[in-house]
Image (tube, rainbow, N blue to C red):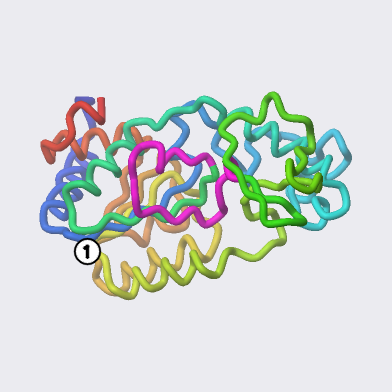
Amino acid sequence: MTAHSASVEASLASVVQHLRQARRALFITGAGISADSGLPTYRGVGGLYDNDETADGMRIEEALSGDVFAARPDITWKYLIQIEKTCRGAKPNAAHLAIACLEQNLDQVMVFTQNVDGLHRQAGSQVVIEIHGNLQELACTACSHEESASDLGAREMPPLCPVCGAVLRPKVVLFGEALPEGELDRFIDAFEEGFDIVFTIGTSSIFPYITQPVVLAACSGIPTVEINPARTQLSDIVDIYLPLGAAEAMSEILDRLGLCPDSAD
């Protein structure tokens, strides 16, 4: 167990107290939860990209947009494969495993994630909304063919459909595209049913669909927790702010709850 300041210790104790009383928990997660799995924390989708422009003379948000994919899928796939390469072989860390463990011990745990790395599902979480999709799921742009691909390293780029020969695309939301309505509706329905505690972990909290549920929960008197080494616009709104990495914080919380010690090592 790591030594912490008195304020962090008090915050951890408060989170544990709330979780002992909770039956339904919501975890809103961003790239920071996968940092301890070796994945970059992305700016939008791209902490891989420090320059204003890519090698193709456009910003990464443009290269990874629906419009560019429609016109030049080779350019979009060039950068998608770089992101996929960083995800390839990554394993869930203690934070992912802790959330999956809590799902076995509470009536309901829902994960609402911005991440496309699939690590929550790998960790064993069953109720997961991947609001930006999953980079390991491919769909044909012309026919109904779909497939899973955990490793795209050996594929030609852009990958082609084995059925009709059209370009495949990952089932992710590219810049400029709408979020999946079905997944949003599923999340809204669950939120309206109510949660006893709401966590936000490892997200920069810049998108309204990430911040609004936390603000609504806080205004409704539902305990809210932010786990993030860096402060965000939610840090002064939540009830409890833990300035820790996701894996460390969730391991500490599980340790205090006495749950799943093997999973969170």
Q: Regarding mark 1 in the picture, which secondary structure is present there?
A: loop
Residue 9, image x and y in percent? 18, 39
Residue 22, image x and y in percent? 16, 58
Relative side of 106 to 80, left or right? left
Residue 223 location, quadrant: bottom left
Residue 87 against residue 181 in the figure, above or below = above
Residue 115 against residue 86 in the figure, above or below = below
Q: Residue at x 63, y 36 (%)?
A: 47
Residue 230 located within the stretch drawn in magenta: no
Three-letter amino acid code of the residue under disc 1: Asp
Residue 147 against residue 177 in the figure, above or below = above
Of residues 88 and 225, the one nearer the viewer is 88
Q: Residue at x 41, y 71 (%)?
A: 188
Count of numbered labels shown in the rendering: 1
Residue 156, image x and y in percent? 78, 30
Q: Residues within 10 Å of mark 1 (few under 14, many from 20)?
A: some
Quarter of the image with the C terminus is top left
Quarter of the image with the N terminus is top left
User: Which residue, given by chain and number where applicable, does mark 1 sit on?
Assistant: 196
Which region is colored magenta? 117-137
Of residues 47 and 100, the one nearer the viewer is 100
The residue sitting at the front extreme is: 163
Residue 190, image x and y in percent? 34, 69
Relative side of 208 to 55, left or right? left
Q: Residue at x 16, y 33 (%)?
A: 255
Of residues 138 and 245, the one nearer the viewer is 138
Q: Residue at x 35, y 45 (%)?
A: 227
